[in-house]
Amino acid sequence: MFLWGGRFKEKSDNTFLNFNRSLHFDYILVEQDILSLISWSKFLLSSKVINKFEQKSIEKCLNEIKENVKNNLNIILKSNCEDIHTWLESEIIRKIGNIGKKIRTGRSRNEQITTSLKMWCKHVINKLIKYIKNLQIKILTLSEKCINIVMPGYTHLQIAQPILFSHWCLSYYEMLHRDKIRLKHILQEIDFCPLGSGAISGVSYKINRKRLAKEIHFSDITKNSIDSVSDRDYVIEILSASSIGMMHLSRLSEDLIFFNSSETNFIELSDCITSGSSLMPQKKNPDVLELIRGKCGRVYGSLISILVTLKGIPMSYNKDMQEDKECLFDAINTWSNCINMMALVFKNISVNYKNCLRSVENSFANSTDLLDYLVSKGVSFKESHDIVGKIVLYAINKKKYLNQIKISVFKSYSDFFENDLYDYISIKNVLNRKNSFGGTSKKQVLHSIKTAKKKI
Ligand code: ARG
C-alpha cells in the first residue's frame, strides 16, 4: 500500500521504491508510532472527524497490533511498505476496513516521524542513564575493594605522583556522571511535542496540541510548525553526547589496556572476558577493551554524518532527514553495548597490588614531595625545584631512587636537608598529605566513595 499515488500516471520503478524505503530501519519506531496514532484518534473524535465507535475500534486495533508486533517484528519486516507509518495505516485498514482510512486526517508523516523519533529517543536516553549508573556502581565497588592499593599516577604517560588505585577509578566515575547529566539535559530539550504541525504549516482543524502532547508524555509543545518538522537538533545532541561518552570509554579502555600490558602488569582481566591468539599459545588479549576503543570511531562517524547531512538543507522537511535514523540507532546501540561491556570488565578485574606498589617505589614519583620538604624549611619554590632536579639527575646516574641516597649527599645539595626527609617522602606520607578536597589521600578518596554511594 502507498500513502500517495492519485496524481501519478505511471507505476513506480521497483529500484526507486527500494531506494526510497525506510521500513527496514524505522520499524523500530512502531510502538511510538502506535501511541501517537492512538492520541491522534482521540483528537479526531474531539473534532468530530470520527465518532466514538470509530475511535474505539481504531484504538482497539492499534493495541492489538502493538501486542502482535511485540512477539514478532517479522510481521513488519516482511512487508514492502515504504515506511513504518505506511505499514501501520495499511495494517489498520486491513483489520478494520474503511474506518482505518480516516486515521490520517490532518496528519503528515513529516510530523509523525519526528514525534515518534523524539519519543523513542526519550525512551533510550532513560535506558542509557540506567546503564551508566550500573557501570558507575561497578566502578565504586572496585574502588572500595582497592582502597589500600597505591599506584603511579601518570601525566604524558610518565610517572608523575603516587595515587590510590581507587582515586583513578573515581576519575572515570566523574566522567560518567557528566555523561548522565548531559543526557538528562537532552531529555529536557527534547520534551517538546511537534504533533499538530501538519506537513509544514499547522493543522486546519481545531486542535488542543497541549492535550495531545500530554497523552504521549511530552511536557510541552513546539512553537513553530516549520521548525517542528525540520528540527533534528536533538539527534545531533544525542550523537554528540554519545561521542563524548564513547571518548570516555575509549580512554578508560586505553588505561586498562596499559595496566594490563606485560610491561606494567597492574591488573589482570579474567579469562571469561579475554581471548587467545590463533598462533601464539601464551597470549591472553584484551580484545574487549580494544573493541570499545575502536567503536568510538564509529560513533564519531555517526555524529559527523548527521552534521554533514543537515548542513545547508533548506526549510523545512527534506527527505535527506531520513538519513538521521540509521546512524542514530547504530550509535545508541554501540554506546549501550560498550557501557554494558565495560561494566562486565569491571566485575572481572583483579588488581596486582604488588606490581602497582613496586612501580611507585622504583620511580621518582616522590620528587615533588622532596621539593615540598625544602619549601617547608623555608627555601623558595624555584630554588627547591632546581635543587631537587639536580638530585634526581644524580640519582639517575647512580641508578638509585631518592630514598636510597645518603643524607650526606642530600646535604651537599642543601643544608636544609635533615634526616626527617626520608619520612617526609615515604609513599604513605606523600599520599596522606594530598588531603585537599578531591585529592588522593585515603581520607579524601573514602569521602568521595561515600558521597558517590549516597548519590547513586
Ligand atoms: N521516512 C521519512 C523519514 O524518515 C518519513 C517522513 C517522510 N515524509 C515525506 N513527506 N516523504 O524522514
Image (spheres, helix red, strand yellow):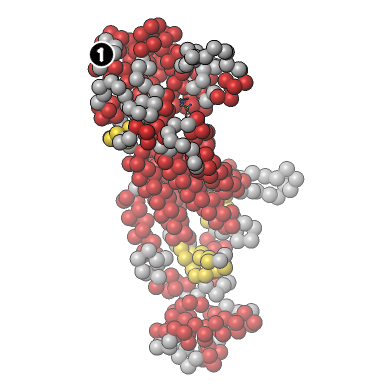
Give the residue at x 51% y 20%: 82
Q: Secondary structure at mark 1?
A: loop
Q: Is residue 173 visible?
A: no
Give the residue at x 44% y 21%: 85
Left or right: 294 in relation to 181:
right
| Whole-percent x, y for residue 168 in the image | 47, 59
Q: Is residue 64 visible?
A: yes
Q: Nearer the viewer, residue 197 or 377?
A: 197
Mark 1 nearby-residue class (10 Å; few <14, some 14–19, many ≥20):
few
| Whole-percent x, y for residue 74 in the image | 52, 18
Give the residue at x 55% y 56%: 255
Left or right: 258 in relation to 306:
right
* Snapshot quadrant of residue 433: bottom left
| Whole-percent x, y for residue 10 in the image | 57, 13
Left or right: 50 in relation to 375:
left
Residue 124 against residue 342 in the figure, above or below: above
Given the current orientation, which residue lies at the most extreme right position?
Answer: 279
| Whole-percent x, y for residue 430 in the image | 44, 73
Give the residue at x 25% y 30%: 210
Mark 1 C-beta to ligand 1 under 8 Å: no
Name the amino acid, label 1: Lys
Given the current orientation, which residue lies at the most extreme top position?
Answer: 97
* Snapshot quadrant of residue 171: bottom left
Q: Nearer the viewer, residue 231 or 284?
A: 231
Left or right: 250 in relation to 37:
right
* Snapshot quadrant of residue 436: bottom left
Q: Nearer the viewer, residue 76 or 414?
A: 76
**Residue of label 1:** 48
Residue 272 against residue 171 in the figure, above or below: above
